[in-house]
């Protein structure tokens, strides 16, 4: 997305649905992260994982790197999503997208940062 955008939901029922969906996505993310960490942990306990001379060393370490990379991608996607505010981490807020940092902020945090950065002479950071 290239433009600043604020998404507001006024209907309390729709807000509740949005908040519950965000919560559900956070739970799914948490479960996936735990799964990836458990799989990495099992690999690290495999025979040959720490032994460079083992025939399985390269294969096991490549698989561990792959799992680590998947976890990083998942965290990156979540940290840049609309699910929670970049600053306060709250999930039950209307959000504003900042095209400069390419992140979502709750309306309150966005306005606070916008005023602060403008006072500091960096208004371009929060259009
Ligand atoms: Zn916030």
Image (cartoon, rainbow, N blue to C red):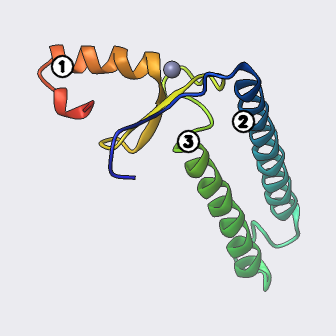
Which labelled disc corresponds to residue 82? none
At which x and y percent is residue 84?
60, 31
Asked whether disc 2 touches disc 3, contact meaning CB atoms under 8 Å apart, the reply is no
Residue 66, compared with residue 86, is above or below; it is below
Asked whether disc 1 touches disc 3, contact meaning CB atoms under 8 Å apart, the reply is no
Q: Which part of the image, by quadrant, shows the C terminus?
A: top left
Instruction: Indicate the quadrant where residue 13 lies.
Output: top right
At which x and y percent is residue 105?
47, 29
Residue 61, compared with residue 38, is above or below; it is below
Under tag 3, what secondary structure? Answer: helix
Could you tell me how far apart the alpha carbons at marks 1 and 2 are, in whole angstroms?
31 Å
Of badges 2 and 3, the one in the foreground is: 2
Under tag 2, what secondary structure? Answer: helix
Residue located beneath label 1 in the image = 118
Under tag 1, what secondary structure? Answer: helix
Could you tell me how far apart the alpha carbons at marks 2 and 3 are, in whole angstroms?
13 Å
Q: Which of marks 2 and 3 is nearer the N terminus?
A: 2
Tell how many labels.
3
Asked whether disc 1 touches disc 2, contact meaning CB atoms under 8 Å apart, the reply is no
Residue located beneath label 3 in the image = 79
Which residue lies most toward the left here? 121
Kindly identify the residue that appears in the image at 75 percent across and 71 percent down.
51
Which labelled disc corresponds to residue 22? 2
Which residue lies most toward the front here? 11
Instruction: Indicate the quadrant where residue 17 lies.
Output: top right
- Viewer-proximal residue among 107 and 87: 107
Q: In this view, does 50 lie to the left or right of 127?
A: right
Q: Earlier in the sequence, mark 1 or mark 3?
A: 3
- Viewer-proximal residue among 87 and 106: 106
Residue 88, compared with residue 3, is above or below; it is above
Q: Earlier in the sequence, mark 1 or mark 2?
A: 2
């Amino acid at each position: 997305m290239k433009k600043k955008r604020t998404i507001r939901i006024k209907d309390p029922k729709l807000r509740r649905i949005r908040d519950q969906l965000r919560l559900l996505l956070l739970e799914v993310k948490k479960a996936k992260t735990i799964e990836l960490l458990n799989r990495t942990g099992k690999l690290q306990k495999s025979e040959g994982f720490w032994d460079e001379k083992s025939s399985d060393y390269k294969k096991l370490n490549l698989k561990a790197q792959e799992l680590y990379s998947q976890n990083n991608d998942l965290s990156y996607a979540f940290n840049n999503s609309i699910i929670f505010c970049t600053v306060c981490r709250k999930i039950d807020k209307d959000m504003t997208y900042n095209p400069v940092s390419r992140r979502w902020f709750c309306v309150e945090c966005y306005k606070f940062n916008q005023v602060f950065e403008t006072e500091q002479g960096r208004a371009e950071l929060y259009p």
